[in-house]
Image (spheres, rainbow, N blue to C red):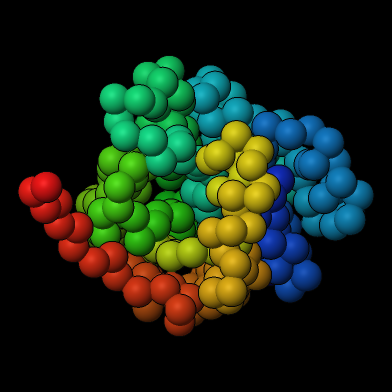
């Protein structure tokens, strides 16, 4: 039986790598994103295995419309809540409030709205939900207040959702990566590729493919096995040290 995965933020990075990984293994892939040209390129590559849907996670009506998918695309076995982004690492008072609201709306509100909308399909199929959180949910860093807060929500949402779904057969997992070299930092810095290159220089970060393989592993475990949380980092990354401010 062919299975179907719904991936948000499928136009780049982890979402795009996961779309390729699952399509290559015979799954049907529904991919959402804001960039129509990227969706078209993936559709051209993956063919009939990929359904491109231009949807912005800020558009709740469009997000909730995914519950009305029908026909060959209506049976969703796995929801990957991958779409998300981060504001610049400026101190909170120096960050534009409108941008912060967009981060919260995408990383929190959009995740809740989509999950709630497609849950009946997932319960019917005894499917699974994988939420992309981050080590930022656990380990603080300067400039990460809002992003880390949204990812802490995703992590806790995953645990409580699993409690809500006890007895339904639906599995819920929070995947919490450390440094993964994608477009994430370029977007965060407003297109500064040099800043992104400097961040990942000489440290052998994880790749989008590494996380896609982790998602594939979790998705294909036996139905009676639920992985609650996966936290992973590149070997060269460790936990943040304490910061100490000293008197002059």
Residue 212 in the image: above or below residue 65: below
Point 89% across, 56% down: residue: 45
Compare residues 40 and 94 and report the one nearer the observer: 94
Going by the picture, which residue comes out furthest to the left? 247
Point 33% across, 45% down: residue: 144
Residue 203 in the image: above or below residue 192: below
Residue 218 placed where, x, y %? 48, 73
Left or right of 13? Residue 93 is: left
Residue 88 placed where, x, y %? 46, 37
Point 91% across, 49% down: residue: 44
Residue 246 placed where, x, y %? 11, 53
Compare residues 82 and 138 and report the one nearer the observer: 138
Compare residues 229 and 93 and report the one nearer the observer: 93
| Residue 143 visible within the image | yes
Q: Quadrant of the N terminus?
A: bottom right
| Residue 6 visible within the image | no
Compare residues 125 and 38 and report the one nearer the observer: 38
Point 59% across, 24% down: residue: 62
Residue 108 placed where, x, y %? 37, 36
Numbered-mark total: 0
Residue 14 in the image: above or below residue 148: below
């Amino acid at each position: 039986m062919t299975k179907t995965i719904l991936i948000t933020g499928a136009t780049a990075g982890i979402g795009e790598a996961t779309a390729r990984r699952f399509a290559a293994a015979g799954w049907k892939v529904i991919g959402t994103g804001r960039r129509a040209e990227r969706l078209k390129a993936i559709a051209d590559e993956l063919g009939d295995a990929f359904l491109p849907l231009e949807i912005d996670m800020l558009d709740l009506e469009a997000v909730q419309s995914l519950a009305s998918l029908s026909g060959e695309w209506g049976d969703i076995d796995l929801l990957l809540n991958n779409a998300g982004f981060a504001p610049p690492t400026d101190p909170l008072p120096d960050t534009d409030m409108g941008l912060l609201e967009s981060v919260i709306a995408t990383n929190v509100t959009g995740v809740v709205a989509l999950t709630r909308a497609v849950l009946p399909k997932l319960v019917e199929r005894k499917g699974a939900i994988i939420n992309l959180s981050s080590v930022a949910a656990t380990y603080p860093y300067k400039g990460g207040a809002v992003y880390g807060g949204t990812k802490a929500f995703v992590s806790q949402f995953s645990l409580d959702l699993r409690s809500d779904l006890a007895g339904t057969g639906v599995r819920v997992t929070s995947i919490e990566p450390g440094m993964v070299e994608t477009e994430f930092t370029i977007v965060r810095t407003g297109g500064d590729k040099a800043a992104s290159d400097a961040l990942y220089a000489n440290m052998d970060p994880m790749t989008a493919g590494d996380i896609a393989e982790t998602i594939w592993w979790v998705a294909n475990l036996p139905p009676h096995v639920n992985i609650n949380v996966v936290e992973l980092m590149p070997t060269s990354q460790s936990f943040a040290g304490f910061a100490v401010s000293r008197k002059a």
